[in-house]
Amino acid sequence: MLREQQSMNNSIGRRLEEYTSKRPQEVLLVSVEIAGEEDQIAIFKGFSSSLMRPTAFDPDTPVLPEDAKIVSIDRAASPYNPDAPRYIQQGISWDVMQGILSEVGV
């Protein structure tokens, strides 16, 4: 049970990264709450990077920790320009995003 739970929690960031590997024309902008602090994480072509705090050099260190609370997800077209983002869909809840992930087999 604990193993399944860890696998499930750990897979949120991995699933989002895998989605962007399958959809390289998209960038995911994930608004999260980590230990009571807000963060924004960009996920593109299978890699995650925090837009508000330092990101570890080790790609095995998750940018999206297990205890993170996803506030919302925006899908933007690549290449991402922070000054003029081209949004595909904004304000997606985690429940809705899970359906989108399932559609692409992630």
Image: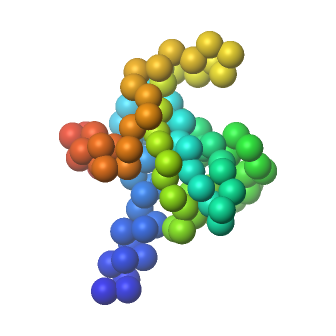
Report which quarter residue 36 is drawn in. bottom right
- Total marks placed: 0
The N terminus, quarter of image: bottom left
Q: How is the image coloured?
A: rainbow
Give the residue displayed 68% in from the left and 16% down from the top: 83
Q: Quarter of the image holding residue 42?
A: top right
Q: Is residue 97 visible?
A: yes
Q: Position of residue 92 (x, y in %)?
A: 39, 38
- Tell me what residue is drawn at x 66 percent, y 22 percent: 82
The percent coordinates of residue 44 (x first, y second) are 53, 36
Which of the two residues, 8 or 46, is positioned nearer the viewer here? 8
The answer, for residue 17, to whether it is visible in the render is no
On screen, residue 67 above or below 72: below
Residue 95 shown left or right of residue 92 in the figure: left
Describe residue 53's horizontal placement relative to residue 83 as left or right: right
User: In the depicted view, which residue is nearer to us: 81 or 57?
Assistant: 81
Residue at x 37%, y 83% (from the top left corner): 3
Horizontally, residue 96 falls left or right of residue 70, namely: left
Return the residue found at the far bottom. Answer: 1
Compared to 50, does 63 lie above or below? below
- Residue at image point 39% right, 25% down: 89
Residue reaching furthest front? Answer: 36
On the rendered structure, is 13 left or right of 39? left
Residue closest to the eye, 6 or 60: 6
Instruction: Return the x and y of residue 55 as percentages of the image width and height.
Output: 73, 51
Q: Foreground: 4 or 67?
A: 67
Residue 102 drawn at (x, y percent) = 23, 46
